Image (spheres, rainbow, N blue to C red):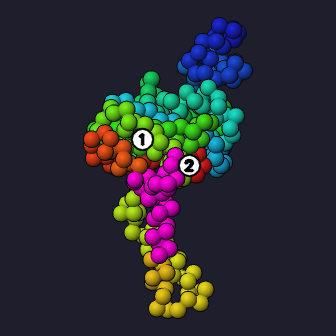
Amino acid sequence: MEITAAMVKELRDKTGAGMMDCKKALGESNGNMQEAVEYLRKKGAATAEKRADRSANEGVVLTDIEGGTGVILEVNCETDFVARSDDFMDFSRRALALVKNEKPADVEALLALKSDGLTLADHLTETIGKIGEKIDLRRFAIFNSEGTLIDYIHPGAKLGVMLEIQGIKDNEEVIKLGKDLAMQVAAMNPVAVDRDSVPQDVRDKERELYRQQALEQGKPENMLDRIADGKLNKYFQEFTLLEQTFLRDTTKTVKDHITEVAAGAGADLKVTRFERFQVGG
């Protein structure tokens, strides 16, 4: 059967695959459009299987806030060139929309959701077939808040932050505060909002490390706990958001700045949560 340009165009419009791939698929299926679509899906699946053990350390971080819902998502691929491609970005935005609208529990549940008649897993396979690289839906987080949600995407979309402030909503000063804090999180990479939020296993690991260091330095046995506690306190100051030095005014801490803004806004403000996604990090 003769494969016409119109047939190739129709298949390309249906699948988004390259012209040569569409022409080959139609040839292999003797012009049957549905079989050609299935051929391209199998090609995508074969490519996905072949690339499964490859490293995917490039990609993008995307965010979306609407009403009281905020979403942050990381999607990975193998090269920066593909990370900037339309096909990769279209898939990433499709995934972001599904997270926002359907609120899946995890990545596995997200891949099972349907969009335009196909599961996201099917769309993933098709996209891998088009671009020829491994794509990995690495992680996402969903915020449901009655407070203020702020997002920040660093230029290049390799680093993103979502942050929640409780206490007042739709206040200009609080929104400005949120933007400053989101940029602080991006730059300083805190591990938690405050020291009480640092998991106990992390506290124990850090304290034991400092104690062991002091022991190896020949410090007296009766001084080890005090030295470890002092260094743990320094750790909290460096790696918890509220105790960090505020980057926009290094004469005060982040907590001090929040207190000042709260006084001006006439509200008790509290940073309750943040997520920081860095591609490959």
Task: Label 2: state its secondary structure.
Answer: helix
Instruction: Say above or below: 237 vs 113.
Output: below
Q: Disc number at residue 177?
A: 1
Pointer 2 and pointer 1: residues touching (CB < 8 Å)? no
Total label count?
2
Between 88 and 158, the residue placed more toward the observer is: 158
Q: Looking at the image, is mark 2 or mark 1 nearer the viewer? A: 1
Coordinates of residue 93 in the picture (x, y in percent): 50, 30
Residue drawn where x is 36% and y is 63% of the image: 196
Name the amino acid type tagged 2: Ala
Instruction: Tell me the quarter of the image containing the N terminus.
Output: top right
Name the side, left or right, on which 145 lies relative to 133: left
Name the amino acid type tagged 1: Leu
Q: Quadrant of residue 28?
A: top right
Q: The magenta stretch spans which residues? A: 230-256
Q: Disc number at residue 140?
A: none
Instruction: Say above or below: 132 vs 2.
Output: below
Residue drawn where x is 45% and y is 77% of the image: 229
Residue 233 sits inside the magenta stretch: yes
Q: Which residue is labeled 2 in the image? A: 187
Residue drawn where x is 69% and y is 8% of the image: 4
Residue 145 visible in the picture: no
Residue 143 sits inside the magenta stretch: no
Q: Quadrant of residue 24?
A: top right
Instruction: Say above or below: 95 vs 220.
Output: above
* Separation of residues labelled 2 and 1 (CA atoms): 15 Å
Coordinates of residue 195 in the picture (x, y in percent): 39, 63
Dot 2 or dot 1, earlier in sequence? 1
Residue drawn where x is 43% and y is 37% of the image: 176
Between 58 and 220, the residue placed more toward the observer is: 220
Task: Label 1: state its secondary structure.
Answer: helix
